[in-house]
Amino acid sequence: NSSDLFLLMKVKQCGFSDDYVIGFYILYNLVFALAAFPLGHLADKFGMKKTLVFGFAVFAVVYAGFGVNNGLAGFALLFVLYGIYAASTDGVSKALISNMVPKKETASAIGTYSGLSSIAVLLASTLAGVIWKYVSPQAVFLVSAGGVALSATYLLTLRFKEKELSS
């Protein structure tokens, strides 16, 4: 995932005012905040891996949508869905990591994950910028949608058992 700035740049490129750009980002954050607990609860009930795959699928839809959408209602829906994606992957991915490593290594594992994620965002954003400039903004979103679809498919093939948390 590249920087969220690319989503906002797409809205701006389509001719919407700064007020809309800011409003859409607020909408995304509001949905993220409101959906995080319910999606975390669903992850506890149905499995973190399934929730992550769901989140990746939503991401693919969102980014494909950004690749083809230019309208106000479409952007509103896409930012709502982007909030759902974030809520279904952000905390859940860290919880899954904490369940996969020995308890005494949890902080190190999550710290490593966060550090590597930041480096990945930097690299993805650099690549997205190059694609935006030399190919097209639409290509940024379609390439990202395809990449996350492949990631979701790969995640589905992984076999691991989530630890049950004791009371």
Image (cartoon, rainbow, N blue to C red):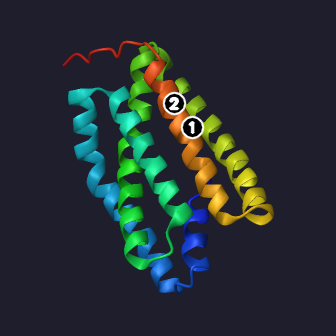
Graded by Cα atoms within 10 Å as few (under 14), some (14 to 19) or many (20 or more), the crowding at tag 1 reads few
Residue highlighted by disc 2: 110
Residue in the image at 41% along x and 63% along y: 78
On the rendered image, what quadrant is the C terminus found in?
Answer: top left
Which of 146 and 76 lies nearest the eye of the viewer?
146
Residue in the image at 60% along x and 48% along y: 144
Is mark 1 in CB contact (under 8 Å) with mark 2? Answer: yes
Mark count: 2
Of the residues shown, which amino acid type is indicated by label 1? Ser
Residue highlighted by disc 1: 114
Where is residue 52 drawn, in percent x and y? 40, 35
Of the residues shown, which amino acid type is indicated by label 2? Ile
- Above or below 81: residue 118: above
- Above or below 130: residue 69: below
- Above or below 108: residue 143: below
The local secondary structure at tag 1 comes to helix
The local secondary structure at tag 2 comes to helix
Tell me if 71 is positioned left or right of 31 in this view.
right
- Above or below 49: residue 128: below
Where is residue 47 drawn, in percent x and y? 29, 26
Q: Residue furthest front?
A: 68
Graded by Cα atoms within 10 Å as few (under 14), some (14 to 19) or many (20 or more), the crowding at tag 2 reads some
Tell me if 39 is positioned left or right of 104 in this view.
left
